[in-house]
Image (cartoon, grey):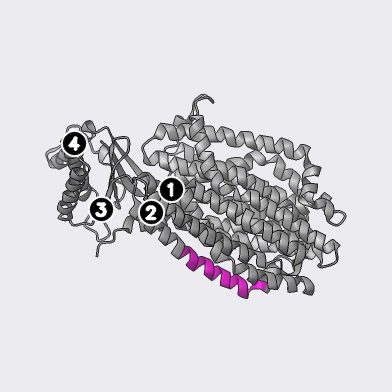
Amino acid sequence: MKNNHYICRRMFFQVLWPSLISAAALSAANMADAVALGNRMGESGLAAIGIVTPLYMIYNVVGLAISTGGGVTHSGLTAEGKEEEAIAHFRSLGILALSVGLLFAVLGNVLMEPILRLLGAGKAQQGIMALCEQYARPIFISAPVFMLNYLLYDIVRCDNGTRRATLGFSAGCITDVALNILFVMLLGWGLRGSAWATVIAQCVSVLIMLPHFFSDSGVLQFRRLRGPLHGGAAPALVSRSVRIGFSTSARYIFQFLFLMQGNRLLLKAGERGIINGEVYVAVFDVIMNVSYLAHGLYQAYSDTMQPLAATFHAEHDADDLRYLLNLAIRHGLAVGMTAGVLLCVSAKPVSHLFGLTDPKTLEVSVRAIPIFCLSTPFAGITIILTGFYQSTGQVKLASLATSFRTLVFLLPLTFTAGRFFPHEFWWLFLASEAGSLASLVVAARINGKKTGQRTKIPVITATLGPDKRELGAVMERVTAFCEEQQIPRKQTVLIEQAVEELCLVTWEKAFNGGPDEYICLTLAAEENGDYVLYIRNSAPYFNPLSMRMDSVSADSQAELSDSAGVMMIKNRVKDLRFRNFQGFNVMTVRI
């Protein structure tokens, strides 16, 4: 039976494994600081790093707004064949990222003490302020490197450099873990050593990803990037790109407020004698580190889906978009819930991993971890849905998911639990994640009804297997579509010729008769009056535009005939482009 989504599925799993590796490496790196410091310094080390952790949330807000929005926009531009715009867009984002990083470095070092007091260091036990400063200063100094690393990972990944992005990201995370062991556990450098381990890891990641721009695997090649600083993208494009990214990175503003509020409330409850404030802040930090793994798995599925969703959205392929979202949620839940169960049953060993050995501290931690894990499936679905809405131009829905989760649920519930029920603080995760997902589903249904009332772009899609006889039925559908849309006869003939010629040359030159050979075709009548044809195939690398047109021998006459047919199409249409995206060949014909 023909698999209509074979290429979509293959592309998804091809990108998924690097994303999962990156998620695992990031989780290890995020936890490395807490594990090393917890075992070396105990609760005071965990409390100090827990107080400073909100600084990373600010970096995430800006860095991911630039990088995630940049990746989505880059995927859309390259899918539409706008390579020069994509290059100018990246150049502008690079300047923006480095400028913001320099600003953070200056302000962070000048305003160090007020910032740490705002985060709650002033309310902690004596000596915590000094520990927090040891960790925060190197992080502020290296802010430009952090911003550049954010940008390179998402841009390289979306510029057909998934493997290099994964390698750079993973190598940086492994470096972070290794140097934490060396600097903190072996050399005893404490919080300062842990911070510098993170900084060096960022540099390693950047250095590994930079060679992408000297390869031919993507659009962003160094020889094409060189140019004057003012030769960037239009401000409107950069602004739109950042807004797309900010629709989800804004959650880190709320995460910053959540961490700061949670730490301050728990410390305050400790001052009132209700709980041991330092113990609860330490366990709170452990929970947040566990969340890096639990939520990171779902984020990997969202990251896998995003460049594909942006591409399918640009190609008006609603059928593959629906399948892609369903695939990400199904597999994400299977892996995420399995991880949640394992964390629940191993709550005590996990607590020991972070250096929590005191019986009273263990009692708090072993109870908190399973309660938190109950919230992760709800959070995971929200993460995947938000990534999907972000990639398909539904920025308002993505923003709504972020703001509702925090403003309506997380922050109010944190205040209520921390102020009145500090012993039951951990239940706020389940309540806020379940309420956020329910709100998002309702909002999506309302938005779907409104969208359904609007005029949609006319589109047909078709999947062809290795049997050439299927082309006849597809040609009939193409002709009927052209008649329904009242496309002029001249353009109709061009569309029919393009479909027939490009499908036939793929069968004859790229396929070898295997069972898993498919051609996916999408034809759309765009609002600007253009008719766009996207033809993707599962063959090994094959570019019909590269077939030779010079003098050929007698036994190469077939290749000459095929190449002449392709060139005839190219000369008659408005635009004909080829690109290899995630290992699959795509021809875009604009008529």
Seen at 34% across and 45% down, the residue is: 455
Q: Nearer the viewer, mark 2 or mark 4?
A: 4
The residues tagged by marks 3 and 1 sit, at their Cα atoms, a distance apart of 21 Å
Q: How many residues crowd around disc 2 within 10 Å: few (fewer than 14), some, or many (20 or more)? A: many
Residue corresponding to mark 3? 462
Q: How many residues crowd around disc 1 within 10 Å: few (fewer than 14), some, or many (20 or more)? A: many
Labelled disc at residue 163: none
Viewer-proximal residue among 86 and 176: 86
Residue 37 spot, x, y in % from top left:
74, 59
Prevalent SS, magenta region: helix
Residue corresponding to mark 1? 392
353 displayed left or right of 48: left
Q: Earlier in the sequence, mark 3 or mark 1?
A: 1
Can you say whether 32 is above or below 223 in the image? Answer: below
Residue at disc 4, secondary structure = loop
Q: Amino acid at mark 3?
A: Ala
User: Which region shows up in magenta?
Assistant: 331-347
Residue corresponding to mark 2? 321
Query: Does the CB distance between marks 2 and 1 fall below 8 Å?
Result: yes
Labelled disc at residue 488: 4
The residues tagged by marks 4 and 1 sit, at their Cα atoms, a distance apart of 30 Å
Q: How many residues crowd around disc 3 within 10 Å: few (fewer than 14), some, or many (20 or more)? A: some
Q: Amino acid at mark 2?
A: Leu
